[in-house]
Image (cartoon, rainbow, N blue to C red):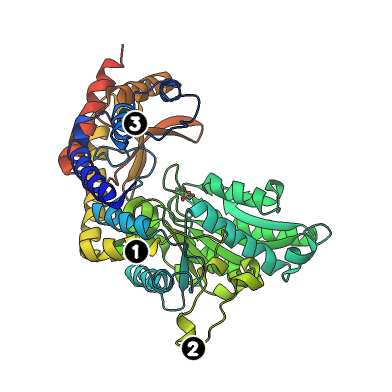
Amino acid sequence: MDLRAFEAWSKRIASWSRAYLETLRDRPVRSRSEPGDVLRALPATPPDQAEAFETIFDDFEALIPDAMTHWQHPRFFAYFPANAAPASMLAEQLANTMAAQCMLWQTSPAAAEMETRMVDWLRQGLGLPETFQGTIHDTATTATLAAILTMRERALGWAGNSQGLSGLGRLRVYASAQTHSSIDKDIRLSGIGLDNLVKIPAKEESGAFYGMDTDALRRAIREDRARGYLPAGIVVCVGGTSIGAIDPVAQVLEIAQEEGLYSHVDAAWAGSAMICEEFRDLWHGVEAADSIVFNPHKWLGAQFDCSVQFLREPAEQIRTLAERPAYLETLEAGGDMSARIDYSEWTLPLGRRFRALKLWFLMRAYGLDGLRQRIRNHVTWAQEAAQMIQADQNLQIVTPCVLSLFSFRHTSGETATRGLLDRINADGRTYLTQTVHEGAFVIRFQIGSFDCTRDDVKTAVEAVIELARTECG
Ligand SMILES: *Cc1c(COP(=O)(O)O)cnc(C)c1O
């Protein structure tokens, strides 16, 4: 493709993008594609001859948008959001064009130094002390794996990295029953083994909201030590995915410190809300953590993927993860050596994208105040939505708003609740997803779509109420 054509197509794609984003409200939120539709439409074999870009683009338009679930739709209230504020999309376009492999400071000085500065801007935004530095990963799953590997190696005096785990004692990690499934996966991948992830019961009355029972946590650690096991760390939940569970952060971190355990806070979703001072009570005491992860790609508006991990002692994670072969060494010395950080030593993959650029664009284009206003609106509108649902005779709130997440059910029971969810998502005005809470099937309602309005929330709630009425028969 010659560069004139590249420019022309870039402009055409920019126009397409505007039209797409402008007309999202007219589309059903969840795709109506049936399994196999796209697969059947794609040729089974690759082209030998070059095709005209016009044809490629026509096929894109014909095949792709209708088979997408529209994550930027203003009435997307499923899962958690994966917001891409337009300013961050533009930054991604520039990063795509420069297409740098930002593994070392030398392979892209601007990316490394921008990462240092942006992580620190976010640290200040979230009200964390200067003792934290940090890095950017692709996702929270990966950031948490890095933390769990560091947890493992710190408990083993870094012997696991060289000797492997056999014969080094049975490691134990503690987390509430409300933590995200990525913790389970990371424990498996780390070689610690799922049997050694001790799930501490989370009760409504214990801790902030379905937080872990700290007496049970102390007891579990004591019993494990008595059995000769090796407690390594605690994963703390701030805003669980199911119903927004929150551990009593200060008490749990105090136990971690008393017991000499590594602590990792998973605030993948709720972390973004901490740019608003009034929500920081939810993670009161967090400054005592060793590691904290949150995803700017969820609520904050940074195009997926972008997961930030704050670290009290980066040296421990670097010691766990860094590889330094001769062919990656930076030979020239000089300049401000403290700015010359090779962030691939802080994270799992060697190769890295220039993710800090979209944070720079995002925070400058909206300002922290602009981002705060969105989050505050979402929290307020979620409370209004929960009130409207509670007031309807066919519906009942099951778990109250934690920030902008609540859950509800149909008063006629589980079958009606399942039927209602099917109807909501077939209807297309909004998209909601489910969870199981204390054995009961419930529908989650989560407001976090970057450009949603109060009217969008109202439209979605009205659709739910209308469809609940027809579910009564
Ligand atoms: C979304 C989420 C995760 C996983 O996030 P990824 O970035 O997709 O790996 C982990 N924990 C919580 C609480 C989440 O909400």
Query: Mark 1 Cα within 10 Å, few/some/many (few <14, many 20+)?
Result: many
Q: Residue furthest top?
A: 473
- Give the quadrant of the C terminus: top left
Which numbered disc covers residue 64? 3
Q: Secondary structure at mark 3?
A: loop
Q: Left of 206 or right of it: where is 261?
A: right
Given the image, on which type of amino acid does mark 3 rest? Ile
Q: Residue at x 34, y 31 (%)?
A: 64
The earlier-in-sequence mark between 3 and 2 is: 3
Q: Rounded to the nearest whole Å, what is the CA distance between mark 1 and mark 2?
A: 25 Å
Query: Mark 2 Cα within 10 Å, few/some/many (few <14, many 20+)?
Result: few
Given the image, on which type of amino acid does mark 1 rest? Leu
Say whether residue 260 is visible.
no
Q: Residue at x 33, y 55 (%)?
A: 92
Query: Mark 3 Cα within 10 Å, few/some/many (few <14, many 20+)?
Result: few
Q: Secondary structure at mark 2?
A: loop
Say whether residue 209 is visible.
yes
* Callout in the foreground (1, 2): 2
Given the image, on which type of amino acid does mark 2 rest? Gly
**Residue that carries the numbered disc 2 in the rendered image:** 334
**Residue that carries the numbered disc 1 in the rendered image:** 357
Percent across and percent down for residue 256 are 59, 67
Count of numbered circles in the view: 3
Rendered image quadrant of residue 230: bottom right
Q: Nearer the viewer, residue 471 or 273?
A: 273
Q: Left of 189 or right of it: where is 135?
A: left
Rendered image quadrant of residue 49: top left
